[in-house]
Image (spheres, grey):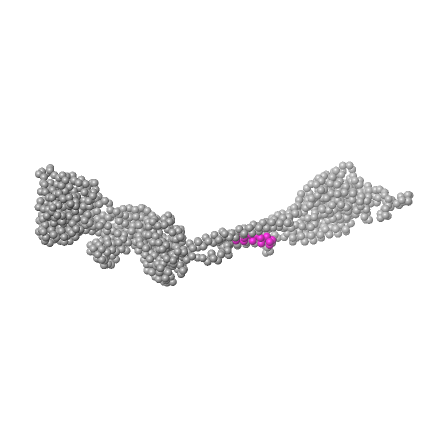
Amino acid sequence: MSPTLDLQALARIRSLEWRAKSIMEGLWRGLHRSPYHGFSVEFSEYRSYVQGDDPRYIDWKVLARSDRTFIKKFEDETNLRCQLVVDHSRSMGFGSGPMTKADYAATLAATMALFFMQQGDAVGVTTFGQTLQDHIPARNRPGHLRRLMLELEKPAPTGGTSLDLSVQQLADLLRKRGLICLISDLLAPVEMLERQLALLGAMGHDLVLFHVMDRAEIDFRFDKAAHFRDVETGTERFIDPASAREVYLNRLNGHRDQIRRACERQGIDYRWTPTDMPMEQVLFDFLSNRIRPKGGPARR
Amino acid sequence: MTWLFPLYLLGGAAILGPILMHLRRRPPQNRVEFSSLMFLEAQTPMPVSRRRVEDWLLLLLRCLALLLLDLMFARPLWRAQSEAAVVPNKATILLLDRSASMQRGDLWKQAIAAAMQHLDQSAMTDRIAVATFDRELEWLWSFDQDKVSASTRGAVLKPKLRELKPGWAATHLGQALVQAGNELAIASGLNAWTKKVVLISDFQEGASLEALRGMIWPESMAVQVVRLETPTADNFTLSLAAKVDEEQTRGLLQNERGASFHRVRVSNSRDSQASDFQLAWESGSKASTPGYVPPGASRVLSVTGTAGTLRLSGDAWDFDNRLYIAPVQPKVVKIVFIGDEKTRDEAASPLYYLSRALQPSSTLRPELTVVSATAEQWPVDAEWVFISGSRPSAALEKSLRAWMERGGFVVSVISDGTSAQDLEALTGLSASAWKLGPSVSSDSMEDYRMLADVQTAHPLLRTFDDERMRDFTKLRFWKHRPLALAKDASSMEVLARFDQGDPAILAGKVGKGRVILLTSGWHPADSQLALSTKFVPLLFGWFGAAGLEQKSSTSLTVGDVIHAESATSLMTPEGQTLRLKPGGTIRAELPGIYSVGKDRLIAVNVAAEEGRIAPMDLAKLRELGVPVGEGEPQGKPSARVEDKQRLAITEQEARQRAWLWLLGALLVILAWETWLAGRIRPSQPQPTFSAT
């Protein structure tokens, strides 16, 4: 699929709600063209079976009654509670492209919120930095989407990333099981992260982890030596990129691998999300994955 | 290939600048905000310099630009063989000042050293002539000698130069330059040569340049100046001042004891530091006289003393501190009075008055001898004869006549007993030409004659030419012999007449001698002449007209010619006696007192101008058309030739204009460098990040 809007054009749309709607438009078009047409978390309809469809979804009752093959889709998704947990730490303010990581994460969260609300699911938003900052519980009522958008539009990320505290607080807040989408750059020690995620998994939550990284962080393509300043801690180090790049990339990849492996161990859906990746693509991959054989707690 | 300004090539070292700049690396000053440093390790900033040069091409271009700029300033040129090879031969005259002022300090040593240096630096193919000058130019080595024996030039000239000593004469610089210029102009075979006069002198202010006014200096003839200097210019000059009008100072010049007053001038040099001096006679125990003259001024002093050497002290240089003054030497004039010796003390006799009138003066010392009229012998060395009141014997008359023919002077009073024949015998004019009347005498003192129509323009009466001396109204004559001359008697002339027209004083030439006739005597019986103020001036005026007075100039300067006149020997101040022919001359080389003959002393002094030792402004020479090289340091005789060569190179460089090509290349290189540097810099811009 191709994105309706590139990231630069998207970044120029000030309103987060409109931005999310633009992405949704592209996403719908992509879904109609795709072989996974109609398979969303909540969508429900019948259509004629065509060759190539999975025979498991044939409604045998209708076949028996009318001798016609129809495919049965997810007509029942009434209890899904999706909590979007967005990292608001200072490191998320970094960005070399048209959008910072924070913008990207907010847009992604807004789009998902819009998507889930249109499905009739309950959606909540939680932001965290050093600690849990704001928490809007998952609901599906008129005006709730607007509230979510306002929360996501809040500027100025502050503080460092401390998943430790945040997840603990979150676990206290989320009593009902549901889908938790964590959007973060995960610039924190992996061991602690795995422990916290395991806690959420143990509580019966379905976890999706969007690992947001900027292209400059991924490639580290700086050509001149400079004093690099950590935006979270404020420490400065003299770095010559030519000599430091290799070590950096090794360590970054190692960190990423560790996270991925930890996610696999905990049954968490890990999504590698560079900020230059089209958002429709991210969502499409995410949705596609959710209707793959494993199924989820929402599928019937 | 050569360079017009080769020193600029040293500027090529400037390429070190870009090389060092390319080796140097500034530690980065920029800061980059980054999300997290957890994957980055701290590094030490890199060193300021690095071994490896970056941007080779840029460095090469920059070095090349600097080198081209350097070469452009050095102005390269290609010299044609023909132009480089032509170096004209040089003809040089070395003029060495040996005037008195060169006696100061080590000036003479400097002069000899400079001359030797020029000799050493001259090539065998050059022509050299050497001369010294003060008042006169004296050749030590001529162009002709140099032409024949240039190879032995040094061997011959150097000993000569070492033996030379500075003289005492004045500096006639102009004259020396004119003579040297003429010599260079007329010397044979030097037409196409580079001509030059090298002047080695102290260039004192007092040097005479007058001779240059009459000469147009040839443009092709250069004058190189080697100025010799002494550390101090403190100098007083002592010289004789002009005498004041004799009439006014007659009483002042001599006092009772015979000592004279001498007027001397003391001048102080312009740049002098000293102003106090002492004056003293060298022989004698008189105390010295202190004095004060500010720098640049002069003062006239009266010094008491007979004669000798006056010595000044108080300045740095001694050469002009002695003033030689010859003693006053009145000339002895032997005068004969023909008459009776016994009447010398008789108040009525002419001899009485004559002997008292003939008193010695500063210039004359009359010696009066009385010869009897009847005597046959008389001193033939007499220079003047007076006859009054007596009639000489025939033999004496004849002898007198012969003496007059040889140049003697006779004053005769025509008295009562004088006949026309006597006058014929005395004057040679025939008796018929004389018309003598009987004596006319006045009866009373109130009846008298006065002089009229006095020919004051005549040499014998020149004394009365001054208007203040022309008053003869108080001169009265009571007795005279009327006299008339025939019209053809042109050999006698009437110098004065009485108021009624009779001649009073007549004069005429007899052979080489002269006769003066008075128609009235000077004694009181005839007239008031002897008692009047006119008598003594009249007598001394006659002596002066006859050339019997001493010539006043007994003080000469070094270099003047001493006339021996009748003397046959001359003693120099050093005590050396020279034999001379009568009437011969000798040049005074030393200051001091010369003895000519037995009793004549002549003082010879250093010229006063020589004492003006302040340095002369060379612009004076230029004003007179002499192209003097200004401020040329000593020991650089070939500087002018170098200048010419330099000029030729400059012209050649201006024709070739190689620097224009270098400039073009430089601009191309600079454009290339700018483009390249602009390309290299923004090639990898630092990513900019936003950290909101």
Closer to the camera in the image, B130 or B355: B130
All told, the count of numbered labels is 0
Q: Which residues are magenta?
A: B55-72
Q: Residue at x 46, y 53 (%)?
A: B648
Q: In the picture provided, is B210 more to the left or to the right than B521?
A: right
In x, y percent, where is residue B88? 42, 57
Closer to the camera in the image, B66 or B129: B129
Q: Is residue B140 visible?
A: yes
In x, y percent, where is residue B688? 65, 46
- Is residue B143 positioned above or below B458 on the image? below
Q: In the picture provided, is A12 more to the left or to the right than B430?
A: right
- Is residue B460 positioned above or below B561 on the image? above
* Prevalent SS, magenta region: helix
In which quadrant of the rendered view does residue A179 lie? top right
Outermost residue on the top side: it is A142
In x, y percent, where is residue B457? 20, 43
Look at the image and tell me in which quarter the C terminus of chain B lies. Answer: top right
In which quadrant of the rendered view does residue A69 lie? top right
Q: Is residue A175 visible?
A: no
Question: Magenta span has B341?
Answer: no
- Is residue B371 positioned above or below A43 on the image? below
Q: In the picture provided, is B194 more to the left or to the right than B685?
A: left
Closer to the camera in the image, A34 or B393: B393
In x, y percent, where is residue B537? 17, 45
Question: Magenta span has B62?
Answer: yes
